[in-house]
């Protein structure tokens, strides 16, 4: 079977597996819904059939990525236990509504699903997300992976060392092998690099850890957002749908809010465990408006803790410089002829993707928040579901000019760039930050030397 046929068959098999494991209801429930925040399952943001044509006279010679782990189980069962405890108390008191009486079995099923694979670990959906992204990478770069296999060019795989990141790397490389079996001889075993891919926890970023633990500006901003009257209103509305008025009146505002936020967290986790939980769906237990408000509260935490953060401060994202440096270094070594690698694949976490997106100036990550005007959906485009959903990825492809081409229409002749770079963000062709000039207006391709200038390298 020819490689293209193998690849098409692999994509069809992976798609069928995903549909079978998640079901149409689960797929619809998490489709680009802000309320799922960074727990949103992955979906590619552009059809690869609509990518720009590679300029004439260039051929792909290298690709690299930085990818978040795929969909996973919740980190622990704390939210589930909190919800079940209050439901049990209400049941003993005759305080459940008809809707509320249906919630506990769904929560138990979800908790059992998480326990079945291990809390925090990659789910079947997460593995599918990685495999399919790998297969689409191969389709995007026709000829590159054939050349990698033929030349014996190594494919380097790096992870944070956390189980879900390593499992994501394994799933991604399994997808590459499904599309191009000849890569088996060049795929390297995953290596752990915590300084590169788990930098938020490392000693050199103690200032960032101190920011999370006790920065007054951060604490004040989040406390102010949590104190918005809409938080108590959404919590009260959620509680009164599930509990009788008599029982609801025995709960303090703090208890109602804690319950509603735990329920919202479980709802966000459900699509990621669709295969393991039989498609458990918690959407009906929160109205869309209430779910969106609790999603906003989670996004606010992410924005201030890992995203663009406060105007004039770089504490949340400057530490991603080590990762940006490595992205450039890999391209530069390949262009200089000092690296034989055909690809470098990195698997990490939201704590690395979100700062990198801000440092790169990617869409949705460029606007900081003035301390006097808190982050809001009304005036800031940052959304966790778009910036760093499960399996979020940033990919750079490197193209080399062929020696026999001098096509003026492609920038040929004297001054023709030796190497071009194209960036994808969640598989969408994405421009580099303002100030970086593409080879032509509207082009997704950039001269490597122009990017070095734009980012102040060398």
Image (cartoon, helix red, strand yellow):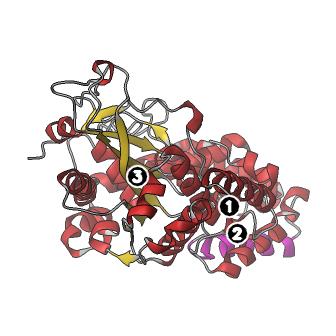
On the image, numbered disc 3 is attached to which residue? 222
Q: Residues within 10 Å of mark 3 (few under 14, many from 20)?
A: some
Residue 380: numbered disc: none
On the image, numbered disc 2 is attached to which residue? 83
Q: Earlier in the sequence, mark 1 or mark 3?
A: 3
Q: Earlier in the sequence, mark 2 or mark 1?
A: 2
Percent of width and height locating residue 198: 34, 69
Quarter of the picture holding the N terminus: bottom right
Q: Residues within 10 Å of mark 2 (few under 14, many from 20)?
A: many
* Residue appearing at x 33%, y 38% in the figure: 369
Percent of width and height locating residue 239: 73, 55
Left or right of 420, for residue 277: right
Q: Is residue 18 magenta?
A: no
Which label lies toward us, 1 or 3?
Answer: 1
Question: Label 3's element?
Answer: helix
Range drawn in magenta: 75-93
51 up-or-down from 242: above or below:
above
On the image, numbered disc 1 is attached to which residue? 263
- The secondary structure that dominates the magenta segment is helix
Q: Earlier in the sequence, mark 3 or mark 2?
A: 2
Contact between labelled residues 3 and 1, with CB atoms less than 8 Å apart? no
Q: Is residue 87 magenta?
A: yes
Farthest residue to the left: give it. Answer: 458
């Amino acid at each position: 079977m020819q490689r293209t046929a193998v690849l098409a068959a692999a994509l069809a098999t992976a798609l069928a597996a995903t549909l079978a494991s998640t079901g149409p209801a689960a797929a619809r429930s998490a489709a680009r819904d802000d309320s799922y925040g960074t727990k949103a399952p992955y979906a590619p943001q552009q059809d690869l059939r609509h990518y720009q044509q590679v300029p004439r006279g260039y051929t792909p010679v290298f690709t690299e990525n930085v990818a978040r782990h795929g969909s996973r189980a919740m980190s622990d069962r704390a939210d589930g236990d909190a919800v079940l405890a209050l439901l049990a108390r209400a049941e003993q008191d005759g305080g459940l509504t008809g809707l509320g009486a249906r919630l506990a079995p769904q929560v138990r099923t979800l908790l059992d699903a998480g326990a079945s694979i291990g809390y925090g670990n990659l789910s079947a959906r997460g593995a599918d997300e990685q495999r399919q992204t790998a297969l689409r990478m191969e389709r995007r770069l026709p000829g590159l992976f054939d050349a990698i296999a033929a030349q014996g060019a190594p494919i380097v795989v790096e992870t944070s060392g956390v189980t879900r990141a390593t499992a994501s790397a394994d799933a991604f490389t399994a997808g590459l092998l499904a599309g191009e079996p000849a890569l088996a001889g060049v795929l390297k075993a995953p290596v752990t690099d915590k300084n590169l891919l788990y930098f938020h926890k490392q000693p050199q970023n103690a200032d960032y850890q101190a920011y999370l633990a006790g920065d007054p500006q951060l604490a004040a901003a989040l406390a102010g957002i949590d104190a918005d009257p809409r938080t108590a209103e959404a919590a009260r509305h959620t509680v009164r749908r599930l509990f009788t008025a008599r029982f609801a009146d025995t709960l303090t505002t703090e208890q109602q809010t804690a319950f509603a936020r735990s329920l919202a967290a479980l709802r966000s986790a459900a699509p990621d465990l669709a295969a393991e939980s039989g498609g458990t769906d918690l959407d009906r237990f929160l109205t869309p408006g209430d779910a969106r408000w609790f999603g906003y509260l989670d996004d606010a935490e992410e924005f201030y803790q890992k995203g663009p953060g406060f105007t004039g401060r770089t504490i949340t994202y400057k530490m991603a410089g080590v990762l940006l440096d490595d992205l450039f270094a890999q391209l530069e070594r390949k262009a200089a002829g000092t690296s034989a690698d055909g690809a470098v694949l990195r698997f990490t976490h939201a704590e690395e993707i979100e700062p990198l997106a801000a440092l790169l100036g990617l869409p949705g990550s460029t606007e900081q928040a003035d301390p006097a005007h808190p982050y809001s959906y009304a005036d800031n485009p940052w959304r966790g579901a778009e910036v760093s959903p499960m399996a979020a990825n940033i990919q750079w492809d490197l193209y080399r000019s062929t020696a026999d081409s001098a096509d003026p229409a492609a920038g040929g002749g004297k001054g023709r760039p030796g190497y071009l770079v194209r960036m994808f963000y969640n598989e969408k062709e994405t421009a580099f930050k303002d100030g970086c000039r593409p080879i032509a207006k509207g082009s997704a391709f950039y001269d490597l030397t122009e990017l070095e200038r734009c980012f102040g390298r060398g």
